Structure formats: C-alpha cells, structure tokens
C-alpha cells in the first residue's frame, strides 16, 4: 500500500493519538502517504446529557466505523476504553498499543489530595465506574456529571464549578496539561480500578485486506493485547454497558496473569469485587471465568438495578 487513510475523532487528544500512530507507522513505512480523516462524533456533539443516557461509548466510534465501511478510510485509531465489545461485520480490531500509565488523576485548585476534600465537596466525573468507586471510598462527597473535551473540563474546574475532578492520567499527560492545575494526585489502582482498555489505543481496520492487517500489526503489543482480550471477554460475557458501573483490569507480572473486577451501584453501595490468577499459558478464558463467577455471585441483578439507578435524576419522569 502506498497510501493509508486513518480516521479519528477531531478532539485534541484523539488527534494526538492518531498522529502518534501515523509517526509509528512511518518508522516502518517511511515512504507511505498517510492522511488523517477527522470526524466529530455524536458523543462529542451532545454535551448536555450524561454519556450513559445517549447510548454510551459506541457514539465515540460509530462514525469512524461508518467511514471505513463506506470505503473512505482504511484504519481507525480509538481510545480502547471507548470501543464496545461488539465489532461490526466487515471490520476487525487487530492491534492494541502498549499500555501507558492506567491511573486516574485527582485534580483540584483548592485541595492537594482526595483525602483532603471536606465533607460535601463536589467532584466532577463522567464515569459511572469512577462514581461508584469514589463514593464507596468517600460516601460523604457529592458527585456531579462532567462532560466536554479535556480543556472544557479543566476550564469548568478552574471556574469553581467543582471542588475537584477526576480524569485519566494518560490523556492529560499526552497533552501536557497536568501542570495547568495547582494540585494533582495519581490514584492507586487499588482505589480506582481502571475500565476495560484504559491507556491503550485500539487499531481497527477493514476486514479482508491482508496487507493492511500486516501494517496494523506493526503497532501491536502482545501483553497489552492479551490483557485487553481478557477484559473485553469479561465485559462481553457479563453484558455490561456504559449504563452500569463496572471496573475490570488485567495485569501481567512475570509469568502470572491477574484480572480483577468490581461492580456495584453508582452511589457506591452493593459492591461486588473478585479477582482471578492464572499462569500466562493457561489464561485464555480467564476473563470469561471471572464473569461467570461474578454472575454466580449476583452480578446480573446488581447490574440491572444499577442501570435503573444511574443518573436517575437526569431522566425525565415517565407518564
């Protein structure tokens, strides 16, 4: 292939990610012409409602997938955490980039750490997963929805709309924005378990093109791919969408694979948490096994009720 078209969301972070992939591919194919096709997704346009109420994270990927299926792009670069477990026919998720730091980051103009927040402080986050874990740890806090791109969220924090906000470390680090906030604190993974795929990029391509697949596989990190597979298997089996608070994280240390998950209500109650370990040679179905154990412990009932409760105040009353 002499030319490659990469489709990407038009946000600053998405463009950083797409250009990073472009630069990585040029290391392997220096003479290849690579163009970016920028798309403003539905998830980026609707900012007055929680993401869970407009159909979830698929709204960050659908328009990009549509461009590939229409023949306008060869490859899409996604934040992997935004990619649903279902991939449309005609497309493949073939490569996962090496994971960066998966931590979530506490940010404030007033308080140095999460523990320093006074009772009743307002914390901003879009994530039901963060909301669940935050209120499980600090039930005395008030959590308020936070939408918009990274710069918009930081502006709302600086204007005093929130006492603190929580965002993924990796995005702020890539855009060199952490220094713009007086106080920041990385939250330990034990306190704030990441979502499926955090801090990796997912490379999705049009199916049936072996040369394109060969090109995309140059970007793949085998350990990150394995961890992502186990996490995505878990999400697929348990049937969790973005309207349910779910955290799941697989890690590899030496020759051992660990996967941990936490589900519950977005108000921090009814928490169910479990983990599994396996040798790396025997971990193929670890994500599915964890999901089945969680289901046996009552996960489906918790998820159903959590879906009903999440953002209840943002839903109009039914007549």
Image: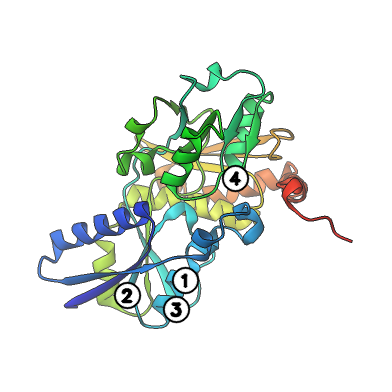
Residue 303 higher or lower than 213, as above or below: above
- List the single residue furthest toward the front: 159
Q: Which mark is residue 74?
A: 2
Of the two numbered discs 4 and 3 in the rendering, the one whose residue sits closer to the viewer: 3
Q: Which residue is mark 1?
A: 63
Q: CA distance from mark 4 to mark 3?
A: 30 Å
Q: CA distance from mark 3 to mark 2?
A: 12 Å
**Residue 199 as seen in the image, left or right of residue 33:** right
**Residue 79 as seen in the image, left or right of residue 121:** left
Q: Which residue is mark 3?
A: 90
Indicate the position of residue 116 as horizontal and vertical percent values: 54, 16
Looking at the image, tell me whether mark 3 or mark 2 is earlier in sequence order.
2
Looking at the image, tell me whether mark 1 or mark 4 is earlier in sequence order.
1
Indicate the position of residue 145 as horizontal and vertical percent values: 61, 43
Indicate the position of residue 289 as horizontal and vertical percent values: 59, 48
Q: Which residue is mark 4?
A: 290
Looking at the image, tell me whether mark 1 or mark 3 is earlier in sequence order.
1
Q: Secondary structure at mark 1?
A: helix
């Amino acid at each position: 292939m002499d030319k490659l078209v990469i489709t990407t969301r038009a946000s600053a972070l998405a463009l950083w990610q797409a250009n990073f992939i472009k630069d990585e591919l040029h290391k392997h194919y220096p003479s290849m012409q690579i163009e970016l096709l920028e798309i403003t997704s539905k998830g980026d346009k609707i900012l007055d409602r929680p993401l869970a109420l407009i159909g979830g994270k698929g709204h960050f990927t659908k328009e990009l997938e549509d461009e590939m299926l229409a023949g306008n792009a060869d490859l899409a670069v996604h934040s992997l955490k935004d990619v649903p477990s279902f991939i449309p026919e005609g497309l493949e998720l073939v490569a996962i980039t090496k994971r960066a730091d998966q931590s979530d980051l506490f940010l404030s103009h007033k308080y140095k750490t999460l523990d320093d927040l006074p009772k009743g402080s307002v914390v901003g986050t879009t994530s039901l997963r963060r909301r669940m874990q935050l209120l499980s740890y600090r039930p005395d806090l008030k959590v308020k929805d936070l939408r918009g791109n990274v710069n918009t969220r930081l502006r709302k924090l600086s204007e005093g709309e929130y006492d603190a906000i929580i965002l993924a470390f990796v995005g702020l680090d890539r855009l060199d924005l952490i220094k713009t906030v007086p106080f920041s604190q990385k939250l330990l993974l034990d306190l704030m378990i990441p979502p499926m795929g955090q801090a990796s990029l997912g490379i999705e391509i049009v199916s049936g093109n072996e040369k394109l697949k060969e090109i995309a596989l140059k970007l793949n990190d085998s350990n990150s791919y394995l961890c992502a597979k186990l996490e995505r298997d878990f999400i697929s089996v348990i049937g969790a969408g973005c309207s349910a608070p779910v955290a799941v994280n697989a890690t590899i240390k030496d020759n051992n694979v660990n996967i941990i998950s936490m589900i519950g209500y977005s108000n921090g109650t009814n928490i169910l948490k479990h983990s599994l370990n396996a040798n790396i040679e025997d971990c193929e179905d670890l994500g599915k096994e964890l999901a089945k154990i969680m289901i046996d412990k009552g996960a489906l009932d918790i998820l159903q009720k959590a879906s009903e409760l999440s953002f209840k105040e943002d839903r109009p009353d039914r007549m």
